[in-house]
Image: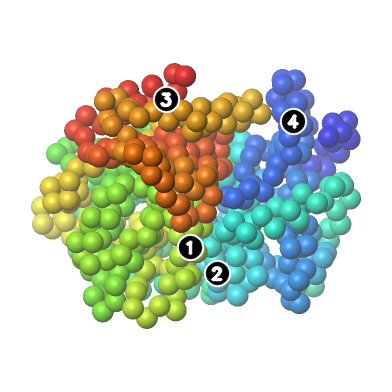
Amino acid sequence: MNRALWESNIENSFVDPQSYYALSESEKSDGFADILSFGTAGIRGRVGLGPNRLNRFTVEKTALGIVNTLAVLSEPSVVIGYDTRHLSPEFSKAMASVMSQHGVSVKLTKQYTSTPELSFFVREYDASLGIMITASHNPPEYNGIKVYGPDGAQLTDEPAALLSENINAIEDIFLIESRPFDAAVADESIGFVSKEVEQRYKDCITKFIGDIPRSDLSVVFSSLHGTSVPVVPELFDALGFGRYTLVEDQSTPDGDFPTTISPNPENPEAFDLSKALGENIGADLLIATDPDADRVGIAVRHNGEYVHLNGNQIGILLLKERLKNTPQDKTPVIIKSIVTSDLGRKIAEDYGGELIEVLTGFKYIGEQIELLEADTDRRFILGYEESYGYLLEPFVRDKDALQIVPYVTSMASQLKNEGRTLVDALEEIYSRYGRRMEKLYSHTFEGTSGGERIKEIMSQFRNNTPLEIEKREVICTEDFKTQTRTFRDGRTETIQLPEADVIKVHFRDGWIALRPSGTEPKIKLYVSLDSDQIEQEAKLINDMIFSV
């Protein structure tokens, strides 16, 4: 990892030299401490200089790896989209230029776009692959690359491993050939996604939403400086819903995300400006999407206060509504991740539906949707994860917040006419199916040493799983890395899911799970219990595990 060679090429790297040389020695060194690799969720990392950072050279290396992966095809084609983050346009053009040089036909979005739209474009153009330049809801210093298969879903494990192998095989990243972007556009080896295709995506949403019931419901919407404006206003207008107000200070694309601590609608702090505006105008519903518009968060005015719904709560509200309004000519199929609340299973079974569990990562939901396409007896109606990701209609194969915004608005509008809120609807679900409550802890460990610390925590818990946790008897432990389910009496079963670094511990009244993030330097603790004291009980469990 020749640091001097990298620094001699800094002017061509897209990295600002002044910012780089202002870093501390340890910050600069971390850019050379490892090689940024393509994992199960693509590539995500800090922008900067070195092989462990995203820059022109590591992006071009990824592009050439994709080219080599597509070499088995006679006429490979790719659609590329990008979000509002720093260097996203530059990275997208760099990838397109490398692909054009090597005979891959490219369609590029003319401006920033959302992740669900990119998934749709891949399917519409019948492309070999799709690429989205985004780091979703990560802090401003991050960016990333997601890769999609021809079905519009992110690559699953086997094709992702092949792509990773082809990327890692490239050694001299300073000699990757690339066509001048303007020349490739001029001879149409690089083209642009058409307005007609962009409109077809919006038409798909308005068609399945139908009508939003008329009411005096008032909505405040924020894009958190991301890609969902102007799409969401256009959808509202097309559906005849006019009682929405944009958080103007957050409606301008800005990779610094200057008006919020975190551009993540999972976090209540992301709603600070929305709440201030909502209180000023008396809004009933606050909705925010993350920068690439695949995740959505919601706050509901209930009894005079705004209640921030968690990802599981949004999921079961959507599930109940979908089951209630789906024709019963086929078995409705719901797909959720293993760390998402079990309450969905009770609701699905009550309506005669089928619930499929998959590993964390929406690509596994997309994979199951693909398997359902030829099934004449079953119908996909919802895919969801507790991390605020949902899909209603499968013309997209990734999380799609842009579908959810008008759908939730329609739900809330109908409830407003009945004198109720989404919180009332949630309480009805709890009264019928049980009060399963959840708490998520995310512990961040930055850098190479942080990665080692995460491995240490997982190893300690895996090798010394307690038989009792905070007075709850452990009845079963699932280790998805060894694909083994172990019962208290010593019996074991094989878990019929792909290998994953997840440990899930079951009690009679719930479960906990430990999982390192696939996209961030974090380890997550999920707590799901039948409890009226979830905050206190979850904290005790968290402290027990992370005080080691």
Q: How is the image coloured?
A: rainbow
Contact between marks 2 and 1 (CB within 8 A): the answer is yes
Residue matched to label 1: 366
Residue 190's place in the image compared with 479, above or below, is: below
Give me the disc on residue 33: 4
Q: Which of marks 4 and 3 is nearer the N terminus?
A: 4
**From the viewer's perspective, is the residue at label 3 or at label 1 nearer?**
3
Above/below status of 454 relative to 496: above
Choose the circle earlier in sequence order: 3 or 1. Answer: 1
Amino acid type assigned to the residue bearing label 4 in the image: Ala
List the residue tagged with mark 2: 151
Q: Which amino acid is tagged 2? A: Asp
* Dot 3 amino acid type: Ile
Residue drawn at the location 30% of the way across and 65% of the way down: 354
Q: Which one is in front, 483 or 99?
A: 483
Q: Mark 4 and mark 3: span between their CA atoms?
A: 29 Å
Query: What residue do we see at 13% from left, 58% from top?
Result: 417
Q: Which type of secondary structure does the marked residue at label 2 adopt?
A: loop
Q: Which of marks 1 and 4 is nearer the N terminus?
A: 4
For marks 2 and 4 on the same chain, the one whose residue lies earlier in the sequence: 4
Q: Name the residue under label 3.
A: 545
Residue name at image x 32 percent, y 34 percent: 474
Q: What element carries label 4?
A: loop
Q: In the image, residue 339 lies at what x, y percent?
A: 39, 45
The image position of residue 505, as x and y in percent, is 37, 38
**Dots 1 and 4: beta carbons under 8 Å?**
no
Label 3: few (<14), some (14–19) or many (≥20) C-alpha neighbours in 10 Å: some
Q: How far apart are marks 2 and 1 (CA)?
A: 8 Å
Report whether residue 249 is seen: no
Q: How many C-alpha atoms fall within 10 Å of the one at disc 2: few (<14), some, or many (≥20)?
A: many
